[in-house]
Image (cartoon, rainbow, N blue to C red):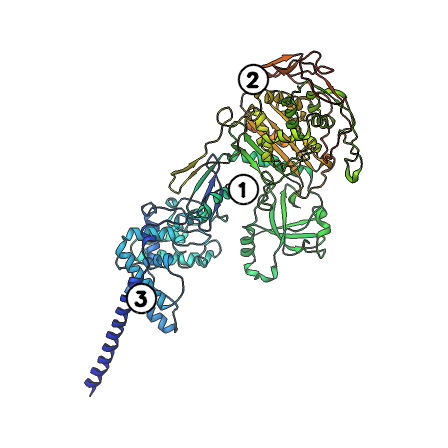
Amino acid sequence: MFRKIFKTVFGLLLGLALFGIGLLAIAVLATYPKLPSLEIVTNYQPRMPLTIYSSDGKLIGMYGEERRAFTKIDEFPPMLVNAVIAAEDKRFYQHWGVDVTGVARALIGNFRAGGVQSGASTITQQVARNFYLTNERSYRRKFNEALLAYKIEQSLSKQQILELYFNQIYLGQRAYGFAAASQIYFNKPVKELTLAEATILAGLPKAPSSFNPIVNPERARLRQRYILNNMVEEKMITPAERDQALAEELHYRRQQVEIDQNSLYVAEMVRQEMYDRYGEDAYTQGFRVYTTVSSESQRVATLALRRALKGFGLGAYRGAEAFIDLKTIEADALDENLDQYLDTVYTVDGLQPAVVLQASRSSIEAYTQGGNRIKISGNALNYVARTINNGKDNAIRPGAVIRVRKLDRGWQISQMPELQGAFVALDSKTGAIRALVGGFDFHSKSFNRATQAERQPGSTFKPFVYSAALAKGMTAATTINDAPIELPGMGSGGRPWRPKNSDGRYSGFITLRQALTASKNMVSIRIVMALGVHEVHQYVQRFGFNARQVPDSLSMALGSGVATPLQMAQAYAVFANGGYKVSPYVIDRIEDNQGRLRAQMKPLVAGESAPQVIDPRNAYIMYTIMQDVVRRGTGARANALGRRDIAGKTGTTNENKDAWFAGFNPDLVGVVYIGFDKPRSMGRAGFGGTIALPVWVEYMRYALQGVPQKGMPMPAKIVRNGGEYFLQEQQSTSPRLAIDNRGATPDAEDIQAAGGDPVIPEETAVEPVQPQNGGGGTAPSPEIDALF
């Protein structure tokens, strides 16, 4: 009887087993042919970020969701490979893609749990999932995963499978692959990992968030101990090596990637250009872009601009930058959560971010990076007293994000300056950008004022008007009346327009050289009137300005159009290089992820392939005039450099809303712009010669250090007579121009002229000009049609 029951049960079980095997075979036969092609794993093309570097190889930008550094499997240290195998797949070298023993163990566990709670995925199955499948917990997905794993094992070697896994697996902190994780968590190449560090990383694939050593150090250590014990069991390491690894003190890096914070505006320019060229592929193909700026040049330019913006003053305290609701954070997780937040807010120029924990009129307690609690009280609160718990959204209260600075006497609450600015340095011969800063801080305001801010250039535009005068027949010795002028009906509301010199003083008949040196508004206006508005409007466009930016009216004489600092640098380069228009560029070369050259910049070089836009003699004479500007005129503060080969022009617009300085020597152009993003007066301190020029001086002191002084070579067919330069073909005498009652509608004021005429040492290549009273006596100069 018992034997009969046994046979019946056995037969039923056998039948069910055969039926199950049959169904499995049918499922395999039906599914296997439909499996996706293995091309993406056999021809692996990892998604690698766009990386951008300075000319000296410093990382200045990284863009792309996946941060990965593709590495051959034999370049990973064996102990890391062993650690991962011990953690994820101890029978990796024995199975055919699926570990049957592990599957059986997982099935029993899932049966007891009443659902799919755990799996037995091998490394090969994880490769299949990462490339083809989702993380859905279902038997269907596990079945497809197993078939794909088998197919992969039939096509790739074990080493190839490991290479895919080690480069593709996600390990938290936006790191894909162990090479990237090594840099992100430990700031070192993967080859330099210790056993302790390797086993920490090996614990990440199972649950990158749960075992993140920065966020959950205790859980990461428990996972590390499990892996080390497995390695001892598998005889990969000795117990002594395990104990030593467990005792090792680990040091993690909190910032994900060390990117040069002084070059972020440049990096963003490159990102935009790469996207325009390659589309979304720019972020996934691992392009390496090398720029024309050096890290040191960027550092100096950034500090110089920041010093000027801070020196102007911070203004009244504007309140907290952001707010965190501390009530939603558990007390025992407060430090961890605040550190995670502060990781995303950068310290800028010593201004550290801090989160207010307690606030009262007498004291403030705040949290800074790394668990530091600081207290600010007494006179240190005077600056912010009105914003403490005042009921406004930006009040200093618990949860407010503020900026603090460490001083010798304690902590101080501060803020970013509201005044903004930009700086550009340009190689005048090639157009290569040598430095570019678009504002005080990229993180708080990414708007790039160097390339995007079109502002009135004021008197820095005058040299282009004077160049037009030379091109149309005037000379540097031509005399023009610097006298008040009234133009009926040309002012606002139909009232007369009465332009004036900013210092309110007038010099009568003076030469063009004297007029530009002292930045005389009346002379600039009369030049445009004499030449014709349309003629000047057409002429100045050859410097790179477009018709929209320059008003086709008398107001252009005073710089009432608009231009970006980069455009001004390009325009001044025409004077510096002898009359050629160069095209600014910041990308030097582009490489693929293997270091192979994809593109190399071939600039149009002045004197070779760049188009000539003005007569070299015109450029030379303008250079000598602007030398006088920095010797004895409005740009006299540039004398602090002690160089005789520099030239330039200051500029300040109406009500001191914009301040400029554009200066150069024959090889390098530098342009500084300073002003508020929402234009308003900077007050009495907001002149180009007082706030912008010092930035230029500080940068040029660095850039020209050790560079021999050399003036611009004098072109042929220039003659010198009476201390002035003339074109050889100019023969007639210099007329006096007294033009009145011509229409205009300018809205820009000039900079105040610097007082006095400092004594300037003789210059080697270009002898300083001493203009003669009355326009240089009998020096040749053409006749000019004008009203007298």
Disc 1 vs disc 3: which is toward the camera?
A: 1
Q: Which quadrant: the C terminus?
A: top right
Q: Spatial distance from mark 1 to mark 3, Cα to Cα?
A: 50 Å
| In front of the other: 333 or 118 | 118
Marked residue nearer the N-terminal end (1 or 2): 1
Q: CA distance from mark 2 to mark 3?
A: 86 Å
Q: Assess disc 1: are there few (<14), some (14-19) or many (≥20) residues with their C-alpha within 10 Å of its C-alpha.
A: many
Badge 3 crowding class, 10 Å Cα cut-off, few under 14, some 14 to 19, many 20 or more, is some
The image position of residue 657, as x and y in percent, is 70, 38
N-terminal of the two: label 2 or label 3?
Answer: 3
Can you identify the residue that label 3 sits on?
Answer: 103
Task: Please name the amino acid that badge 1 sits on.
Answer: Leu
**Relative horizontal placement of residue 612, taking residue 400 as reference (left or right):** left
Label count reads 3
Q: Which residue is mark 1?
A: 264
The residue positioned 51% from the left and 29% from the top of the image is: 430
At label 3, which amino acid type do we have? Val
- Mark linked to residue 715: 2
